[in-house]
Image (cartoon, rainbow, N blue to C red):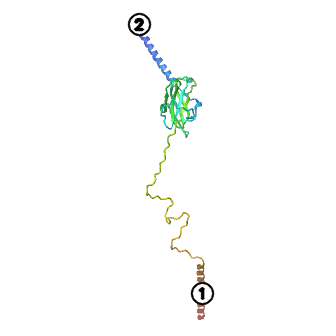
Amino acid sequence: MELKHSLKQAGRFGLSAAAGLVGSLALASAAQAAIVTIPINPGNVPTTAEDFQNSCDNLPDGQGVGVDGWVFVLPAAAGAEGNFISVTATFEDAEGVEHVLSTDGDGGIVSGSGDNKAYITAPLGWTLVDAEADVEDPDEGAQFNLTHTCPGTPGEEESSPVEQPSSPGEETTSPGSETPGESGTPGEESTSPAGSSLPTTGAPLTIALVSAAALAAAGAAAFMYLRRRREAQDW
């Protein structure tokens, strides 16, 4: 009888343990399912850090040059348990290209009393266009807010290299300081080489032509005279 009683107690204990294990697994699954992604208040975006309410609270010291700080708040009205789990924000640069940053690699979660906060740092001048956050067990329709921003300061511009002066005694050639005669002036016609002859024009040419014509006429007359004389002798 005692053996049967012991077996019954062991069976009841085993059933209770199994039920407890199943309940624990169910609670764990429920806890995982309670993480929900909620959006940012659409009235907070789009904006630049310069155009929003400015404050550098809740940001780490030494934010750095050329960086804007963005601080988000999870209000009590969201009904979430605990703090932010993570925040992911979408920015546009000056060229309109989108960049996605998050508290995991570009910021952090701020622990403190009251409303819970998180921050992200982004390059100077970028525009926040959207954001979302993972929180635990929020109310239906919950949202979070951008609470303030810390505009950064521009970095120092790189100075242009200074032109080094020429060493003393070093000759410098100014543009256009060519030796006269080495090259002609642009647009100026080149002169003919020395000793080249050009055709003679004008009165000397006319005299030469008249003289040649006169000599030709005299020669023709002499030729005709001699021919007629020879013909007369033949008769």
Please rate how many residues cluster around mark 1, counting C-alpha atoms within 10 Å: few if below 14, some from 14 to 19, many from 20. Answer: few
Which residue is at the far top?
1
Q: Quadrant of residue 142?
A: top right
* Residue type of the residue flagged with mark 2: His
Whichever of labels 2 and 1 marks the residue nearer the N terminus, that label is: 2
Residue at 42%, 9% (x, y): give it.
9
Q: Residue at x 59, y 92 (%)?
A: 229
Mark 2 residue crowding within 10 angstroms, few (<14) / some (14–19) / many (20+): few
Label number found at residue 50:
none
The outermost residue toward the left is: 3
Q: Is residue 112 above or below residue 207?
A: above
SS assignment at label 2: helix
Helix, strand or loop at disc 1?
A: helix
**Distance from the alpha carbon under mark 2 to that under mark 1:** 174 Å
Quadrant of image for the C terminus: bottom right
Please, what is the three-letter code of the amino acid marked with disc 1?
Ala
Q: Nearer the viewer, residue 61 or 207?
A: 61
- Expressed as whole percent of the image width and height from the top left, the position of residue 11 reads 43, 11
Give 201 or 69, whichever is nearer the viewer: 69
Nearest to the eye among marks 2 and 1: give it: 1
Residue 132 in picture, x, y percent from top left: 54, 30
Q: Which residue is mark 1?
A: 218
Which residue was labeled with disc 2?
5
Could you say which quadrant of the image residue 76 lies in? top right
Q: Position of residue 177 (x, y in %)?
A: 50, 61
The quadrant of the picture occupied by the N terminus is top left
Q: Is residue 209 left or right of residue 33?
A: right
Which residue is pictured at 43% across the width and 13% down the height? 14
Q: Is residue 145 above or below residue 93?
A: above
In this image, 17 relative to 187: left or right?
left
